[in-house]
Amino acid sequence: MLNDPGLVAVLAYDGLCTFEFGIAVEIFALPRPEFEFAWYRHRIVAVDPAPMRAAGGMQVLAEFGMESLIDAQTIIIPGWRSRDERPPQALLDTLIAAHQRGARLLSICSGVFVLAAAGLLDGKRATTHWRYTDELAQRYPCIEVDPGVLYVDSGQLITSAGSAAGIDACLHLVSRDFGTHVANAVARRLVMAPQRAGGQMQFIPAPVAQKPRDDLASVLEWATRHVDSLLTVKQMAAKALMSERTFLRRFSEATGMAPKAWLLQVRMNLARDLLESSPLSNEQIAGRCGFASAESFRAAFRKAVGLAPMAYRAQFGRH
C-alpha cells in the first residue's frame, strides 16, 4: 500500500463532460474517513480560460491552471468536447512532459482522443466508447484499438470505454495503489458492484434475448462456490442441462466472456483477496482457487495482475 498516493489532477475544459468529470471527483476527491491511511490529494485544473461551460448548462471555475500539473502523479482526462477538434497544443505539450517524468494518465471515453493527439498511444493498445473505436483506429493507425473491453491498462496510460467504464478504470487505479479490498470499499460507498475487470465486454446494442438468462444464474453461483475444483466447460454445461455448444453461446450472451475467461477472473479475484487478507501460502491459495499447482498459480497470477503473488502480498497485504 502506498504511503502517499500523490496528487490526482482532473482536467476541466470548455464543453466539459460532466458525468465523466463527476466520476473522477467522486472517486479521488471525496474525503475517506473510513480509511486509516492517506487518501489522494486532489486538484481541478483548467485547460481553458474561465468561465468554462459544462454539459447541462453549468459553468465551471477552477482555481488552478495547467502549470500546476507539474507535480501531479496522476492526470485524469474526463472526455473531450469534440473528437474533430485538435486539443490545444499547450495541453498536449503539458501531457507529454507529464508522461516523460513518469505521471500516470487516465482517459475516460472520448478523452482518449487527447492522448492520441499527443502521440502518447502510438504503438500501444487502447480503447474508447464502442461508437468511437473505428474512428480512433482510422485516424490513428499506430494505435492498437481494442473495441471490446471496458478499459486498457498500459502502465502509465489507462484508457477506458464509455462513461460508466470510467468508474471501473478509476477503481482499477485505486486497486493498483491500495489493493482490491480498498477498491471494493470505495465501490460499496458508490453503491455499485465491485470493480469489473478490464477485459469484460463493453455493452454493444444487440437483439434482446427472448428470455432472461436466469438459467445461467444458478450455474455461475455453483461455479463460484466450487472454484477450488478443476471445473470444465463440460461440467458447467451439464449443470445447466445444455449441450456445450448451446452453453457457450448463452454464456457469452449473458456475460460477454468465455467460461474459461470468467473462471480465471473469479479465481484471480479470490486469490487477490486471500493474498491481501490471509497468511495462506502460495500452495494453499492455489488449491483454494482451483489451480493444479503453485507454479501454475504463480504464472497465471503474474500474467493477470503484473506482479508475482508474494510481491502483491508485500504491497497490499494487511498482515
Image (cartoon, grey):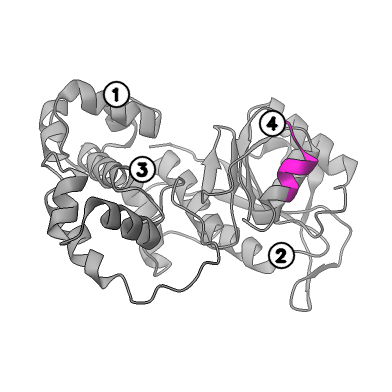
List the residue tagged with mark 3: 179
Residue 29: quarter of image: bottom right
Mark 3 surroundings: few (<14), some (14-19) or many (≥20) residues within 10 A? many
Identity, as a three-letter code, of the amino acid under mark 2? Cys
Identity, as a three-letter code, of the amino acid under mark 1? Ala
User: Residue 213 appears at what percent x and percent y?
Assistant: 30, 70
Mark 2 surroundings: few (<14), some (14-19) or many (≥20) residues within 10 A? many
Identity, as a three-letter code, of the amino acid under mark 4? His
The front one of 156 and 126 is: 126
The disc, 3 or 1, on the residue closer to the chain's N-terminal end is: 3
Mark 1 surroundings: few (<14), some (14-19) or many (≥20) residues within 10 A? some
At mark 1, the secondary structure is helix
List the residue tagged with mark 4: 99
The disc, 1 or 4, on the residue closer to the chain's N-terminal end is: 4
- What residue span does the magenta drawing correspond to? 135-142
Instruction: Please give the label number shown on residue 217.
Output: none
Vertical comparison of 49 with 314: above or below: below
List the residue tagged with mark 2: 17
4 or 2: mark nearer the eye: 2
The disc, 1 or 2, on the residue closer to the chain's N-terminal end is: 2
Whether residue 73 can be seen here: no
At mark 4, the secondary structure is helix
Asked whether disc 4 touches disc 2, contact meaning CB atoms under 8 Å apart, the reply is no
